[in-house]
Amino acid sequence: MKVNRSHATTILFAVVAATGMVRSSWGQSYTGITFTIDPSLSYFTLGGDIRDPDPDSSTVYPFIEQTPGSMTEALNGSLYTTLYGTYGSYSSIYFSSASIGVLSQPGPFDPGGLPANFAAFVDLTAVAGQVAQGAFRNSTANFYGGGYQPIDGSGDFPVVGTTFTSSGTFDYAIPTIISGSSGFYGSAGDMSASPGNVHVSGGNVDLSIPISGTTTQFDPSTGLTADYTFAGNIVAHGVLPPPPPP
């Protein structure tokens, strides 16, 4: 009987998710682990600038924090992974999905005088005679990898090839000129060359993933293009399921 490889892979991951463990015939095993993100050690910094609306100009206008730290926020949530290798000593890791929350700061931040995940000013005095206000709200994030990432003897694995995304609502205002709200979606598909790390100690597993990348978004409502930078780190903790039967 011919077996569809994609269908077989789907069944395998379903079994891993349901049982936490699948042993192969040659002593290796697939171990499903849900990692809980530690908000005290995990953060995301959003940076970047606005391009001059004149296509012939190379001038950019950088984001300026509305208050100290207003462009950096803690992360929480979960990462869903599968580790492959000898139980407790793994040779590769697969990121199947994630549920990442971006915590909010009370502010108040403009526009609106409300809490926000990130808040910045942009000095557009040269082109608009005013300082623009921007606040990112209702932000979420995601992280996923492109297949199994090899783990070396130190627990390091490549992050290049994985993707970190962030989405939410961007509220903006150039007082007396324009104000509004638009959707924000940024995808850093070329992550940092710095490796991630997975560390197994007894029945506990610790995971760290550096966040680094860039993305560009054009806002048709304002006619402005923003170049964003992503930076930060995810630290998460998990627990090994019981070892498979001999």
Image (cartoon, rainbow, N blue to C red):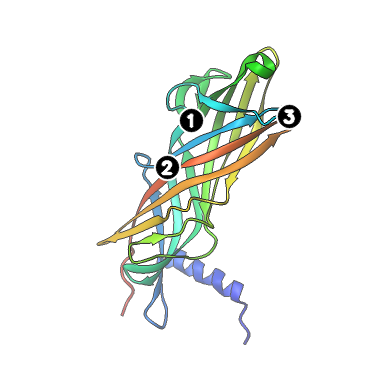
Image position, residue 11 (x, y; %):
54, 71
Residue under the image location 62 percent in, 77 percent down: 4
Element class at badge 3: loop
Q: Are marks 1 and 2 in contact (CB under 8 Å)?
A: no
Q: Amino acid type of disc 2?
A: Asn
Q: Residues within 10 Å of mark 1 (few under 14, many from 20)?
A: many
Residue under the image location 52 percent in, 58 percent down: 145
Residue underneath mark 1? 71
Horizontal relation, residue 150 to residue 200: left or right: right
Image position, residue 70 (x, y; %):
46, 27
Q: Nearer the viewer, mark 3 or mark 2?
A: 3
Indicate which disc, 1 or 3, sits on the residue closer to the N terminus.
1
Residue underneath mark 2? 76
Indicate which disc, 3 or 2, sits on the residue closer to the N terminus.
2
Residue under the image location 56 percent in, 69 percent down: 10
Residue 172, relative to residue 130: is it above or below? Answer: below
Q: Amino acid type of disc 1?
A: Met
Residue under the image location 68 percent in, 17 percent down: 128
Element class at badge 1: loop
Element class at badge 2: strand
**In which image quadrant can residue 155 be found?**
bottom left
Which quadrant holds the N terminus? bottom right
Residue 121, relative to residue 162: is it above or below? Answer: above
Residue 10, relative to residue 81: is it above or below? Answer: below
**What separation in Å lies between label 1 and label 3 (alpha carbons)?**
23 Å
Which quadrant holds the C terminus? bottom left
Q: Residues within 10 Å of mark 3 (few under 14, many from 20)?
A: few
Horizontal relation, residue 94 to residue 153: left or right: right
Residue 126, relative to residue 33: is it above or below? Answer: above
Number of dots carrying numbers: 3
Residue underneath mark 3? 223
Q: Amino acid type of disc 3?
A: Gly
